Amino acid sequence: MTAHFNYKDTLARAERIRWRVEDLIGDGKRLDFTKRFLPESLARTEPVSFLSPREKRLLNQIRAHGYLYTFGLVEEFILPFVMDHTRALIDERDDYRTRALLQFAGEEAKHIHLFKKFREEFLSGFGVACDVIGPPEAISAKVLGADPLAVSLLILGIEWMTQAHYTESVRDDAELDPLFKSLLKHHWMEEMQHAQLDSLMTDAIAASRNADERLAGVRGYLELGAFLDGGLAEQAKMDLDALERAAGRRFDASERAEIVRTQHQALRWTFIGSGLVHPQTKAALHRVSPQGAKEIADVAPAFC
């Protein structure tokens, strides 16, 4: 069984989408820091009842900064992974596949540029340092050192969750900053093709494996998720430090623990859980390994 996508149609859709980083941010196009940037379903600031409305907005914006930084970080390993996969297929003379995957890589490079530009604009307007996990090169090296099937499944979950984030939470939220919302919309437009292409890549990698090797790949995906979860726990602490700087006050020990707990779980849902439970990710996992899919389903609630 394979995904119901093909390279020709995916390439055709990608070539109809045309936008430049310069069209979306900079040159007078500014973020509105009086508004929320992320939908509450991702930010989850409301459960922190002792924060004032202003502090909740600040935390939301800090989380939005980390949201796009983290996507930029993961695209730092998606780009070389796609390029390596494409290079291995060049001699097969499937022109649509080669062109579609090269288009995929070019768009990921554009997204990295977009997110770096956003970070410059954000820090300039927000006025407070927001530390982030990294460096990206070390995280990329760790991920790319894993089983290619595990890496492909990780990327697949990331690609599909961007689709769910936009369509289920961002698109219809009229209270978000229009510029930040526009960045997510344009990212979403291209990630649909990427999700479909990675579905095809995952199927192709799995096709060369036996059942035990496929199960090992799924378990490797879980291990990568645990690695990223450790980074998200550190990011929650960094976000708390940034909130204290922005709010101009120090929270007590119990308050700090509550903020870190709620925000770590929010980050887990945003970057891991929403990918694990996406129907397309679940379908791909079942194609790769029914036993592996069940093991993923058993642990997914911890990330939701």
Image: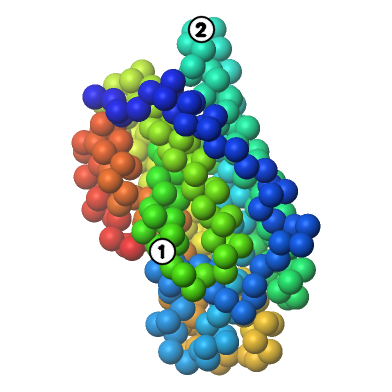
**x and y percentages locating residue 10 in the rendered image:** 44, 28
User: Mark 1 = which residue?
Assistant: 172
Q: What's the amino acid at mark 2?
A: Arg
Calculate the distance from the C-alpha at mark 1 to the C-alpha at mark 2: 43 Å
Q: What's the amino acid at mark 1?
A: Asp
**x and y percentages locating residue 121 in the rendered image:** 73, 63
User: Mark 2 = which residue?
Assistant: 93
Q: Which one is nearer the viewer's eye here, 167 or 300? A: 167
**x and y percentages locating residue 148 in the rendered image:** 47, 30
Of the two numbered discs 1 and 2 on the same chain, state the one appearing first in sequence.
2
**Residue at x-position 34% and y-position 34%:** 216
Q: Label 2 crowding class (10 Å Cα cut-off): few <14, some 14-19, many 20+?
A: few
Q: Which one is nearer the viewer's eye here, 254 or 113? A: 113
Element under label 1? loop
Residue 118 seen by the camera: yes
**Residue at x-position 57% and y-position 85%:** 55
**x and y percentages locating residue 252 in the rendered image:** 55, 92
Residue 137 seen by the camera: no
